[in-house]
Amino acid sequence: MINGAFGSGKTSTAQMLQPLVTNSMIFDPEEIGLMIRKIIPEEVRHIHEQTDDFQDIELWKILTVKVAGEVKKKYQKHLIVPMTLYKEENFNYIYNGLKELDEELYHFCLIASEDTIYNRLVKRGDTVGGWSFQRTAKCVEAFRKDIYQEHLITDHLKTTEIIDIILKRINNNYKCNSTK
């Protein structure tokens, strides 16, 4: 799992990491969210689900775990999951669900300052003051919590450096486990 605020570099990291992780593929829960939003009209959703965030639709987190399980079972691949999960309930549900699918689940949370995030959002073409900008402060605050460990502070890191850190962590753990 590669977590972090919108604009923190999750997708770029996942795309560059995927060819370096043997037998892996990217599994993006955002695609499930976009589908859910299309097939469940707002008037059908429960009141608390009628927001501009598909992560508020209960079925999203359930389907994310179920689809990940089916994909993993069918294709026997390591899943690289880039997703902003700053709401604790959603994070816990998805993290625990993925952990049941694979005991060797890794979670990396890309941390950066609000200014760094804002600059990255502008650089990628997001509208200043738009949806992602509006969530930056909440994400930065939420990701300080210990439940979102393992924190990777990325303000001054290139994507290649982030990938190196992730690969070292994965490979060190793999070596430790294989010698037991």
Image (spheres, helix red, strand yellow):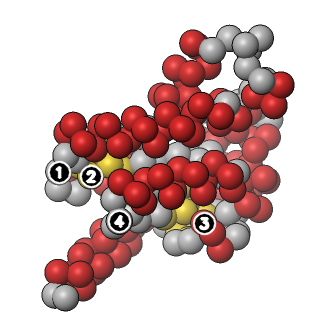
Residue count near mark 4 (Cα–Cα under 10 Å), binned few <14, some 14–19, many ≥20: few
Q: Residues within 10 Å of mark 1 (few under 14, many from 20)?
A: few
Q: Is residue 14 left or right of residue 150?
A: left
User: Which disc is residue 23 wearing?
Assistant: 1
Residue found at x 65% / y 34%:
58
Q: Is residue 95 visible?
A: yes
Which residue lies most toward the right here? 47
| Residue pointed to by mark 4 | 103
Q: Are marks 2 and 1 in contact (CB under 8 Å)?
A: yes
| Vertical placement of residue 142 versus 76, above or below | below
Measured Cα–Cα span from mark 2 to mark 1: 6 Å
Observer-side mark, 4 or 2, equals 4
Where does label 3 land, which residue? 148
Could you tell me if the residues under marks 3 and 1 are in contact, i.e. CB atoms within 8 Å? Answer: no
Residue 112 sits in quarter? bottom right
Which three-letter amino acid code belongs to the residue tagged 2? His
Cα–Cα gap, marks 2 and 3: 21 Å
